[in-house]
Amino acid sequence: MVKSKNFIFDGGAATYFGTGILAFLITAFTAGLGYPWALCLFQKLKAKHTYIDGRRLKFTGGGFSLIGLWIKWMIFLIITLGIYSFWLIPSLQQWITEHTDFDE
């Protein structure tokens, strides 16, 4: 298998593990309402260690900009007994992508 020279991820296990623990604690202690902040922690970590054509990515989203959507999505999930997840997952990926840019 040929490795890509255009896309590079240089993150390590220790930072990923530490971020995972922090994200879990934020989510657990807030009964899920802190998940937008936990998600943003992970996205910032992944973007910080990702390079495309030698240019580093940065994640510009924050928990406050996602919390309103997150609450709306959770209400729709409950009302539709989970069927809304087919729309939630692409919408969340769209939000993540729209808040990812090149670090200048």
Image: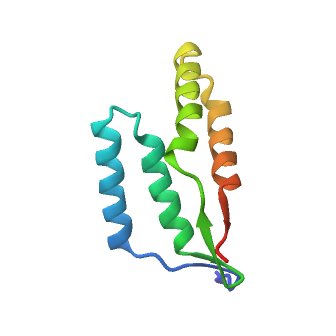
Horizontal arrangement in the rendering, residue 87 relative to residue 18 (left or right): right
Locate the C terminus and report the quarter of the image it occupies. Answer: bottom right
Q: Work out whether residue 87 or residue 4 is closer to the camera in this orientation and state it.
A: 87
Instruction: Compare residues 50 and 29 and report the one nearer the observer.
Output: 29
Q: Quadrant of residue 6?
A: bottom right
Q: Is residue 93 above or below residue 71?
A: below
* x, y percent for residue 50: 58, 74
In the image, is residue 100 above or below residue 96?
Answer: below
The coloring applied to the image is: rainbow
Give the image location of residue 52, x and y in percent. Answer: 68, 77
Q: Position of residue 100 (x, y in %)?
A: 65, 60
Q: Quadrant of residue 81?
A: top right
Q: Is residue 104 left or right of residue 75?
A: right
Q: In the displayed image of the protein, which residue is found farthest to the top?
A: 79
**Considering only vertical position in the picture, is 28 above or below 2?**
above
Q: How many marks?
A: 0
User: x and y percent of residue 27 in the render?
Assistant: 35, 41
Between 100 and 4, the one nearer to me in the picture:
100
Q: Residue at x 31, y 54 (%)?
A: 22
Q: Is residue 10 left or right of residue 5?
A: left
Quadrant of the snapshot with the N terminus: bottom right
Residue at 51%, 62% (x, y): give it: 44
Identified at 62% across, 71% down, the residue is 57
Res 13 quadrant in image: bottom left
Determine the residue positioned at 47% across, 58% down: 42
